[in-house]
Image (tube, grey):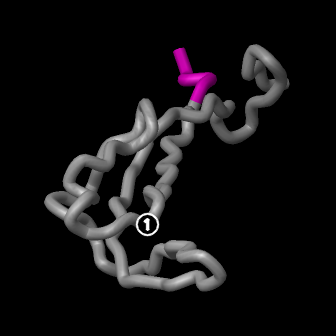
């Protein structure tokens, strides 16, 4: 019995919103995502504060998150909803 279904593993990465690094400990990834950075995250972004007529920008931190999911696909030479060949 040849395998008809050859699922592809897909990795989806995303980054959380930029916040002050001291607050970033508490930041959670969206549901279903795994946090792949720890502590205060990565200081590679800037966040903005509006003060009266000015917008100030400060260095901040964010976390990187990852989600793995399987995309159903037919094996080579097979197709259709039930992955049958010829």
Which residue is at a point 37% across and 60% down the rendered structure image? 64
Q: Position of residue 3 (x, y in %)?
A: 55, 23
Specify the farthest residue to the left.
39
In front: 77, or 50?
50
Is residue 48 placed above or below 80 in the rendered structure?
Answer: below
Quarter location, residue 73? top right
Is residue 59 placed above or below 82 in the rendered structure?
Answer: below
Is residue 45 placed above or below 72 in the rendered structure?
Answer: below
| Span colored in magenta | 1-5
Is residue 46 placed above or below 27 in the rendered structure?
Answer: below
In front: 63, or 78?
63
Residue 18 is a magenta residue = no
In front: 13, or 63?
63
Q: Viewed as shown, does residue 73 lie left or right of 37? A: right
Which residue is at a point 37% across and 83% down the rendered structure image? 59
Q: Position of residue 32 (x, y in %)?
A: 42, 32
Q: Position of residue 82 (x, y in %)?
A: 75, 15
Quarter location, residue 71? top right
Q: Position of residue 60 (x, y in %)?
A: 35, 75
Which residue is at a point 50% across and 73% down the rendered structure image? 49
Main SS, magenta residues: loop
Q: Viewed as shown, does residue 78 lie left or right of 64? A: right
The residue carrying mark 1 is 18
Q: Viewed as shown, does residue 84 lie left or right of 58? A: right
Which residue is at a point 43% across and 79% down the rendered structure image? 45
Q: Residues within 10 Å of mark 1 (few under 14, many from 20)?
A: many
Secondary structure of residue under mark 1: loop
In front: 74, or 30?
30
Q: Quadrant of the C terminus?
A: top right
Quarter location, residue 80? top right
């Amino acid at each position: 019995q040849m395998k008809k279904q050859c699922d592809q593993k897909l990795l989806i990465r995303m980054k959380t919103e930029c916040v002050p690094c001291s607050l970033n400990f508490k930041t959670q990834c969206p549901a279903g995502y795994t946090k792949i950075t720890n502590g205060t995250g990565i200081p590679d972004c800037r966040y903005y504060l509006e003060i009266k007529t000015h917008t100030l920008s400060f260095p901040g931190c964010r976390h990187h998150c990852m989600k793995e999911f399987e995309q159903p696909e037919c094996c080579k030479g097979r197709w259709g909803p039930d992955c049958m060949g010829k």
